[in-house]
Image (cartoon, rainbow, N blue to C red):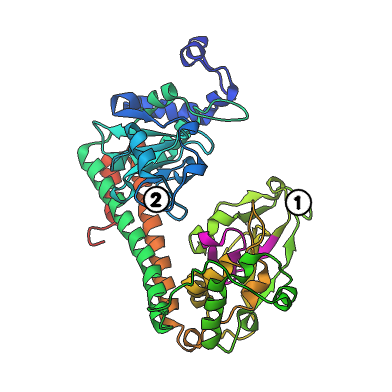
Amino acid sequence: MAEVNLSDLEFSGRLDAEYYRPEHLRKEAILTERGGTPLSLLCDFLIGPFGSAFTVENYCDDPTYRYIRGKDVKAMAIEENDNVYMPKSDFERLSKYALKAGDVLVSVVGTLGNSALVEPHHVPAIFSCKSTALRTTSIDARYLIAYLNCKYGRDLLIRKERGAIQKGLNLDDLKSLQIFISSPKLQSAIANVHQLAGLEKHASKSALLRADSQLAKAMDLASWQALEPLSYVRRSSEAFTAERLDAEYFHPQKASALATLRAASDIAVGDLFSSVRKLWQPGEGLPADLVRNYDLNDALVPFLDGEKSPVARAEIASTKKLLQAGDLVVSRLRSYLREIAIVEASADYPMVASTEYIVLRPRGKIILPVEALLVYLRSRLPQILLKWSQDGSNHPRFDEKEILRMPIPRVLIDNPAPYVEAMQAMKSAKQRAAKLLNAAKRAVEIAIEDSEAAALAYLHQAAPPEH
């Protein structure tokens, strides 16, 4: 319970009790004591174009000009696993909304309060109206990212949300957000840690790309070409056997990829892995029981985080699949997203996931490690098979039998070690990146709660110079 003066109510323009929660007031008081500065004095603001100015129908395949949606802005990073792009003509038409490297994007509609840095490889790009761009003038952008994502910046930002059904942050509230400005020395140290995290992220992605390239070389696919015929014919017996009548299922690209894989294989995924269908029901337990719940987007990164924040059983409304460490989950929706991930161990809570996942578990003795299978399923030929096996229009999906009967090249089974090592390297780099980002946020909190000297000492220990 909190009591506030009438003058404070009039000043803020807010009458809702949530705005005056004791925790918010405590953090606000600490920032006031430490000399918080309004965000409006530290940067310029750029609001994105109206939603009608550029719509999903205008997306294109040319990756030159990116369109950064509200859902792409995550805490500390811009999502890069489901990019969309816009034509040059639209980019030029909306050029006043063009982002620059060093801009900070803050999500102001939908999932509120996420903030991430625009890096050089993100531009040229336009952003949607679901975010606001901050162009810093007198504060380091990487330091600002760390502050906005630490418990002080994020909580005080989320505090300013307005609305009931469609929550949002308006520009005036964003401008009034109090920012703790540290010394240039601490800002620089935190910025360096943020940059190191970016290098680790790049190393993580590079490990997976190398593994994919190595597999293509092992399978001698350098000269393999996908067919692009104008027409093709299949026998009715093939349609009846497959129980499919849609032309896409029998596309020559799929037939060619399947023939290539069969020539290199004498074993299928289903021979080595079973599809686990054990279900978890939200109503079969205490409402307060905690569980880690994974949706499909969690598999955009090829590891389901074993430390994802748990939620109460009562917060889950639908049936889920029960997971265990070492499973491989494959989203049967939108195969092009390659939402395939290894389930990490969870020490304290059960793990459940969307029923749109196919859950693969090794049969008995492990002949092919899940790390190698993941690299294979994400590679070119399996993705062609899945692309042309999808059914449906609004939510195209493929049946689990397409995975289970997919051939596995013998070269993968005979030598899985390089792909296991690549995935382990990827995971290690990902963990180092997360540790560094957490250290950057924590350093800001220590500077606010203790001193900048203590924050610098913490950073020296958490991210020593030799990193």
The residue at 39%/45% (across/down) is 87
| Span highlighted in magenta in the image | 321-344
The residue at 64%/59% (across/down) is 353
Mark toward the start of the polypeptide (1 vs 2): 1
Q: Is residue 5 left or right of residue 196?
A: right
Q: Quadrant of residue 209?
A: bottom left
Q: Position of residue 241 (x, y in %)?
A: 73, 77
Above or below, 359 relative to 82: below
The residue at 74%/48% (across/down) is 287
Above or below, 416 relative to 342: below
Q: Amino acid at mark 1?
A: Leu
Residue situated in front as seen by the camera: 236 or 180? 236
The residue singled out by tag 1 in the image is: 286
The residue singled out by tag 2 in the image is: 438
Q: Quadrant of the N terminus?
A: top right
Q: Secondary structure at mark 1?
A: loop
Q: Residues within 10 Å of mark 2 (few under 14, many from 20)?
A: some
Q: Residues within 10 Å of mark 1 (few under 14, many from 20)?
A: few
Q: Position of residue 330 (x, y in %)?
A: 59, 66
Residue 213 visible within the image: yes
Label 1 – label 2 distance at C-alpha = 33 Å
Mark 2 and mark 1 in contact (Cβ < 8 Å)? no
Q: Quadrant of the C terminus?
A: bottom left
Magenta-colored stretch includes residue 341: yes
Label drawn at residue 246? none
Q: Secondary structure at mark 2?
A: helix
The residue at 49%/77% (across/down) is 372
Magenta-colored stretch includes residue 298: no
Q: Position of residue 430 (x, y in %)?
A: 40, 61
Q: Position of residue 83 (x, y in %)?
A: 44, 51
Q: Amino acid at mark 2?
A: Asn
